[in-house]
Image: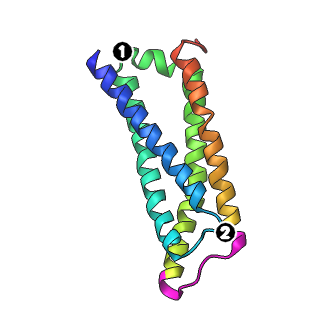
Amino acid sequence: MTLEAILAYLHLLAILTMVVFIASEAALCRVEWLNAAVVERLAKVDMVYGIAALMVLATGIARTVWGVKGTAWYWTNPLLHVKLTLFIVIGVMSIFPTLTYLRWRKTLRATGALPPEADVRKTRKLVMVQAHLLAVIPLVAVFLARGFGR
């Protein structure tokens, strides 16, 4: 029972970290606020977001393997597959902003130039879509935890 509680805690902590850092990206990635310091910070914030996402995945898998319900209960439930699909979609979508932040930082360091407004708006839109999709996963999780989909 203690292991189950620790795994749940670590999973929740990773989720909250992920949410905080995607929200930070959304707040920082604005044309009005973008300056050299923000370009540098976005790359760092995105790195923490990525690490948190990996921790969400790792702790989620750990919960299915070592948790009380076990793999047979989780992996046969289609709602788990919905959660994973949403998570993967978000992960794939996050590749573009990550590469964009790294490109912006490289350009900034080489030339001192800030990214064009259109590039910032496009990137922010992708970050916002990720954030909104991320908000759907807990809804699916609540139903999964209560045995729906079985």
> How many C-alpha atoms fall within 10 Å of the one at disc 2: few (<14), some, or many (≥20)?
some
Q: Is residue 58 above or below residue 6?
A: below
Q: Is residue 44 left or right of residue 79?
A: left
Residue 68 badge: 1
| Point 57% across, 53% down: residue | 94
Q: Is residue 77 visible?
A: no
Residue 31 badge: 2
Outermost front residue: 32
| Structure colour scheme | rainbow
Tell me where residue 99 sits by quadrant.
bottom right
Outermost right residue: 118
Q: Is residue 19 left or right of residue 68?
A: right
> How many C-alpha atoms fall within 10 Å of the one at disc 1: few (<14), some, or many (≥20)?
few
| Point 29% across, 15% down: residue | 1
| Point 65% across, 42% down: residue | 132
Which range is magenta? 109-119
Residue 58 point in image, percent of width and height: 38, 37
Q: Is residue 107 left or right of residue 136?
A: left
Residue 121 badge: none
Residue 90 point in image, percent of width and height: 59, 45
Q: What amino acid is at disc 1? A: Val
Q: CA distance from mark 1 to mark 2?
A: 47 Å
Secondary element under disc 2, as helix, strand or loop, is loop
Instruction: Choose between 128 and 75: the one closer to the eye.
Output: 128
Secondary element under disc 1, as helix, strand or loop, is loop
Magenta stretch containing residue 114, yes or no?
yes
Magenta stretch containing residue 123, yes or no?
no
Q: What amino acid is at disc 2? A: Val
Among the two numbered marks 1 and 2 on one chain, the one whose residue lies closer to the N terminus: 2
Residue 67 point in image, percent of width and height: 35, 20
Residue 87 point in image, percent of width and height: 55, 39
Q: Is residue 18 above or below residue 106?
A: above
